[in-house]
Image (cartoon, rainbow, N blue to C red):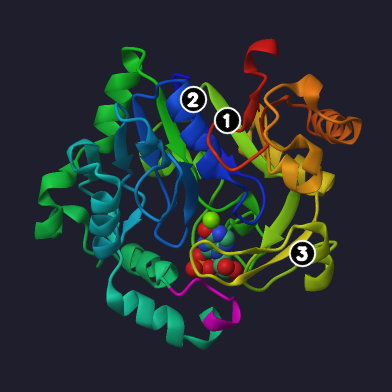
């Protein structure tokens, strides 16, 4: 803080939503800015209720946090309005006037285009919407009457706020290995997902960023097609308690053990200063609900130490359960 970027390390679904909701509550964030688009679902548990948010930033759990959607994002109007209702954030959410609009026709193109189908896209139409933006024919937020109450200047608000020391978090979506440039091309999403791109979509320059937290999950998952080193069979994933389904599309997630080479790459390209490691309790069930590093079993500590050795950055936030506060926060000790 004051400006922290949260970036996913692998193929998304690392648990960024949980880390963001923890930081919003713990650090009393002033602003949480979402980038990316509706294809990503961030799962957040708040007061016993589960939210799978495609548009509303994860900082909504802290009621004084202002929520913004950056100029580089694509907004699905109906989904946005539905989530605003569900989370009761009407009075504290804004969209940049130049954020693109993702329309029904984009989703239809996504679902019918053979090459996109082959990539196993989410079907929300993000790739076709970005194509439209590149052609400079896309509608933007200021063109949509229903969005009028929400339209604002996002970069202006956050850059001004940072100059007076307000705390701003930039929320990335997906993970580095789904990046259009650095991921497993062509099995990637339609945009860069690295920390630099998150800043660019929000309108924040690299010298304004204090911390980049790369989010690792204690095992790796991916949905859709494309390579996954060390992939386990579904039976083995179930046996290990790693089998998941996608919170957005409901599809099965493929899974594999943690991979240090991929973690190193993600730390490097994101310029990470710290790491979060989520779902440690899924790999080491004795960790469930732990709130102190010393309470962890040796195997779990070894995984954390090895991650730090290999990536060269401290693992400061460790997820031990689904609720925002099921977490070990080592930021003060490092
Ligand atoms: P698209 O982003 O819908 O074009 O899909 C391209 C690839 O990215 C597919 O393999 C999707 O499954 C994957 N993908 C897109 N968004 C997410 C996400 O939020 N989590 C995990 N995978 C995603
Ligand atoms: Mg997700």
The reply, left or right, for residue 185 in relation to residue 161 is right
Identify the residue under disc 3.
Answer: 228
Which residue: 53% across, 35% down?
Answer: 324
Snapshot quadrant of residue 278: top right
The reply, left or right, for residue 20 in relation to residue 65 is right
**Above or below, comparing residue 130 to residue 142 in the picture:** below
Q: Which of 34 and 53 is in front in this view?
A: 53
**Above or below, comparing residue 321 to residue 188 in the picture:** above
Identify the residue under disc 2.
Answer: 209
Q: How far apart are marks 1 and 2 (CA)?
A: 8 Å
Question: Where does ligand 1 appear, by image quarter?
Answer: bottom right
Q: Quick one: label 1, few (<14), some, or many (20+) residues within 10 Å?
A: many
The reply, left or right, for residue 54 in relation to residue 329 is left
Q: Distance between the residues labelled 3 and 2?
A: 31 Å
Q: Do the residues labelled 1 and 2 touch (CB within 8 Å)?
A: yes
- Residue 325 percent across, percent down from the top left: 55, 30
Q: What stretch is highlighted in magenta?
A: 117-123
Element assignment for label 1: strand
Element assignment for label 3: loop
């Amino acid at each position: 803080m004051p400006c922290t970027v949260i970036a996913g390390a692998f193929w998304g679904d690392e648990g960024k939503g949980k880390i963001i909701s923890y930081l919003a509550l713990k650090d009393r964030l002033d602003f949480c800015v979402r980038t990316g688009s509706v294809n990503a679902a961030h799962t957040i548990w708040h007061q016993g209720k589960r939210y799978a948010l495609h548009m509303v930033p994860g900082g909504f759990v802290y009621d004084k946090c202002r929520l913004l959607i950056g100029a580089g994002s694509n907004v699905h109007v109906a989904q946005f309005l539905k989530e605003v209702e569900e989370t009761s954030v009407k009075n504290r959410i804004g969209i940049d006037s130049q954020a693109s609009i993702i329309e029904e026709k984009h989703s239809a193109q996504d679902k019918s285009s053979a090459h996109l189908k082959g990539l196993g896209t989410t079907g929300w139409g993000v790739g076709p919407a970005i194509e439209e933006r590149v052609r400079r024919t896309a509608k933007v937020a200021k063109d949509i009457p229903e969005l009028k109450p929400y339209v604002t200047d996002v970069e202006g608000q956050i850059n001004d706020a940072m100059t007076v020391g307000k705390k701003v978090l930039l929320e990335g979506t997906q993970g580095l290995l789904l990046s259009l440039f650095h991921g497993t091309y062509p099995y990637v999403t339609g945009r860069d997902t690295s920390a630099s791109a998150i800043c660019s979509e929000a309108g924040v320059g690299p010298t304004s960023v204090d911390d980049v937290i790369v989010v690792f999950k204690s095992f790796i998952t991916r949905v859709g097609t494309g390579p996954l080193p060390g992939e386990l069979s579904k039976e083995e994933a179930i046996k290990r308690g790693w089998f998941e389904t996608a919170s957005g599309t409901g599809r099965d997630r493929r899974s594999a053990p943690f991979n240090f080479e991929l973690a190193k790459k993600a730390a490097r390209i994101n310029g990470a200063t710290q790491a979060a490691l989520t779902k440690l309790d899924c790999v080491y069930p004795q960790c469930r609900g732990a709130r102190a590093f010393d309470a962890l079993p040796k195997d779990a500590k070894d995984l954390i130490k090895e991650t730090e050795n290999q990536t060269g950055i401290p693992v400061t936030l460790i997820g031990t359960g689904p609720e925002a506060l099921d977490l070990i926060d080592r930021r003060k000790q490092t």
